[in-house]
Image: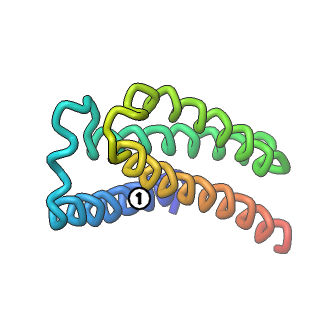
């Protein structure tokens, strides 16, 4: 299977499963009313995270194709850029609510996609190692 297609399917699975669990926890604990009037939503946060991880995944695949030895460095640079973009996404929601509801939910989403991006970089670096051993 093509690396890109496989990673997109994993991204869709991670997004669906994590969003479902996150939504269910908020709904079960009756915390979903905090989104009203904040300008943010749980689905918006997951869409931002998924799209930014998709862009980073394409960058990693391009690096893996053109400069396979630099994939790890590309991951570090990409995470720095992604962290900056995440700040610009969430900066209006910081200290908006007294209970840090927006910040905590965004932090969960950010770490889900940080782990996914680390998985992609690890997958690509290890695929390269497997090809070298053959």
Q: Which residue is mark 1?
A: 9
| Residue 71 drawn at (x, y percent) | 76, 48
Query: From the viewer's perspective, is 52 left or right of 60?
Result: left
Q: Check disc 1: other Cα within 10 Å, few if <14, some if 14-19, many if 20+.
A: few
Query: From the viewer's perspective, is 130 left or right of 94?
Result: right
Residue that extends furthest to the front in the rendered view of this protein: 98
**Position of 114 relative to 130 (above/below):** above
**Position of 54 relative to 28 (above/below):** above
| Residue 105 drawn at (x, y percent) | 37, 50
Res 130 quadrant in image: bottom right
Identity of the residue drawn at 21% across and 44% down? 34
Callout 1: SS: helix
The foreground one among 92 and 9 is 92
Res 121 quadrant in image: bottom right
| Residue 126 drawn at (x, y percent) | 73, 66
**Position of 84 relative to 25 (above/below):** above
Identity of the residue drawn at 36% across and 56% down? 15
Quadrant of the snapshot with the C terminus: bottom right
Number of dots carrying numbers: 1
| Residue 48 drawn at (x, y percent) | 40, 38
The answer, for residue 65, to whether it is visible in the render is no
The foreground one among 12 and 98 is 98
Identity of the residue drawn at 77% across and 51% down? 72
The foreground one among 10 and 53 is 53
- How are the residues colored? rainbow
Query: From the viewer's perspective, is 30 left or right of 97?
Result: left
The answer, for residue 85, to whether it is visible in the render is yes
Identity of the residue drawn at 30% across and 59% down? 16
């Amino acid at each position: 299977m093509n690396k890109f297609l496989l990673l997109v399917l994993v991204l869709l699975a991670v997004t669906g499963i994590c969003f479902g669990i996150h939504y269910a926890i908020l709904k079960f604990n009756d915390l979903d009313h905090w989104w009203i009037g904040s300008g943010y939503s749980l689905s918006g946060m997951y869409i931002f995270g998924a799209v930014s991880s998709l862009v980073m995944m394409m960058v990693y695949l391009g690096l893996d194709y053109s400069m396979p030895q630099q994939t790890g460095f590309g991951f570090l640079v990409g995470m720095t850029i992604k962290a900056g973009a995440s700040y610009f996404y969430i900066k209006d929601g910081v200290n908006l609510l007294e209970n840090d509801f927006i910040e905590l939910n965004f932090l969960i989403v950010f770490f889900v996609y940080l782990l996914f991006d680390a998985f992609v970089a690890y997958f690509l670096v290890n695929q390269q190692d497997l090809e070298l051993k053959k």
